[in-house]
Image (cartoon, rainbow, N blue to C red):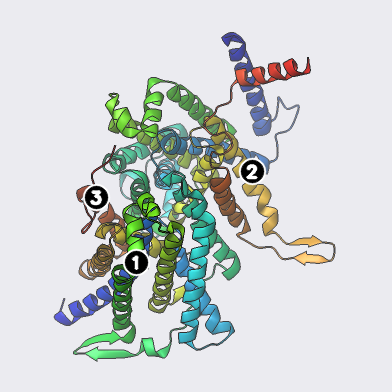
Amino acid sequence: MTLTEFLQHLANGISLGSLYALIAIGYTMVYGIIRLVNFAHGDLLMVATYMAFYGMLLFSLPWPLVFILAVILTTVMGVTIERVAYRPLRDAPRITVLISAIGVSFLLQNLGLVVFGGRSKAFYVPPFFATINHIGETAVPNLVWFIPLVTVALLMILMHLLYRTRIGMAMRAVARDLDTARLMAIDVDQVISFTFVVGSSLAAVGGLMWGLKFPQINPLMGAMPGLKCFIAAVIGGIGNISGAVAGGFVLGVGEILLVAFFPDLAGYRDAFAFVLLILTLLIRPTGLLGERVAEKV
Amino acid sequence: MDRNNNLLYTLIAVLVLAVVLAWAQTGLFGLVSPWNPYTVRIMNLCAINIGLGLALNLVNGFTGQFSLGHAGFMAVGAYTVALLVMSPAAKQMNFFMVPLVAPLDKIQVPFLVGIIMAGLLAALFGLLVGAPVLRLKGDYLAIATLGFAEIIRVVIVNVKGLTNGALGLKSIPGHTNLWWTAAYAALTVLLMVRLVNSSYGRALKAIREDEIAAEAMGINVFYHKMLAFVLAAFLAGVGGGLQASLIGSIDPAMYKLPLTFQILLMVVLGGMGSITGTVIAATIVTALMEILRFVESPLTLGAIHLPGIPGMRMVVFSLLLIVVTLFYNRGLMGDKEFSWDLLHSRRQTKQGVTQ
């Protein structure tokens, strides 16, 4: 493998990794605050791409406007899901909430199949993203640097939100101890809703990026990225935002380089994430950056 | 009500069931004809799903370990049966892209041997998967088992010389009939009842209620979890094998998460930790899968013509799962079981009221 090829793969890996990171942040925030694997997170990604698809196809609106509308509508949907399917189960065993989340995920997928049809559709990629730049001999489409840029920008906004604002402080308090936070007069339900606002909008942005990167969209497209990004969050240490970013990069770069160095293993690409997950859980269950928590009796 | 009477009732019930099954499958002594194949097929599916549901309930309901790896073990069972029971000629027809590896292309064994091998191989996978992942708890365990099921599926897609890859296997001999499936369901029920009422079953329930307390009481937690997990894998393998032989063709895409979800729906609907519940729910869900086909076919109500909506059934089932978890999360039976005494005591109290 020449250096140019390697750099090419690395650029792709970083691009994919930052996309994983973006979606993983949403998972990790929701998990951090209510200890729930939000299975529907990946399907929100699908919902966002379809909204953008139909926005551009039916109403022929300009793409920046469509993207913003898609993010807003998906966010509303994410918050509604929390209100309807998760909030009534706040005091139920965690497994019950998990089953509810699985149910919502399947509802979205099957509803997607009914409403949008099962056939894959071609997502419109605005010319801006498809333009290819050459850095040395490495070909870099605009999209490849655009995705990491978006991730970094959103990450900075998020960090500001979490560590410099009142609602961010409330979120951290609820994540640390929900009951005590409630005693401190924090409106826990509102904070959880807000967490879903943040998580769902990140999923929507991630979904739009995903649609631009892999422009074949279908109602089941959210399932695999959803699982992989949850895995990224676990690898980095769930509940920890820097961890989610680290996990996303490890997974994205690892996946691309695995295929680059061992082309024979290309078919096993989807299994790579799961192998990495199981190794992480066995060797370092709290993830790369997670804190070790002693089990309370 | 003494024990002997209960035993008698059970025997009568089993006998009646056997006669009905014989009638459905072969007809009775040429006097009445067998039931139509469509009904019999649904009955077969019901019986297989009862077994599969009970296997999942053993791990998720009785032991309290949330596993989402059922489809993986079913895939192992299905491929084992297909590869062992198909005739060499049929195998040659299937493997036209990459030939089947050496000894397997000549081997053909009786169905029973194939089914048992399917169970044993799935159990072996259960052992290999369970040993590392059963140290995890709750949602981590769910994701890890889901991950293993997905790995099994990806491997099946890629090992073309053994599994024919994404093309799957066709014309698997259809040995499965009501006798096989009913025996599978009945033996699973029997096994579960015996297990749950033994010291093992009490240990499993103790682990479900409080793992740390159970360990403090001297229960070997890991051993019991493994026992439940491997047994469930065995039953899932057998069920997968029977299903493969019933359907006649398999491919890796069948064994994705939706399959596990379908079985999970039966367990949750029936009540986590109830054998009776799973049996009832498996029957209802399987039957509904067929009955609800009408929502997918075009419908004409007088002047109104509704086009058929394919995929609507699964929407109904996802909604059902959400509604049950939200409003009725103990399921049909909670963790209660059917017993003759229960029926009898109810009748007595009713009589008492009327007198």
The residue at the point 38 percent across, 20 percent down is: B199
The residue at the point 55 percent across, 51 percent down is: B322
Side of B49 where B76 appears, left or right: left
Say the numbered circle drawn on residue A168: 1
Pick the residue in front: B134 or B289: B134
The residue at the point 29 percent across, 37 percent down is: A297
The residue at the point 57 percent across, 42 percent down is: B328
Q: Mark 1 lies on which chain?
A: A
Q: How far apart are marks 2 and 3 (CA)?
A: 42 Å
Side of A229 where A204 appears, left or right: right
Nearer mark to the viewer, of 2 and 3: 3
Indicate the secondary structure of the residue bearing disc 2: helix
> Which residue is label 2 attached to?
B287
Nearer mark to the viewer, of 3 and 1: 1
Pick the residue in front: A47 or B308: A47
> Which residue is label 3 attached to?
A285
Specify the amino acid type for callout 1.
Gly
Q: Position of residue A111 (x, y in %)?
A: 57, 63
Instruction: Count up the numbered dots.
Output: 3
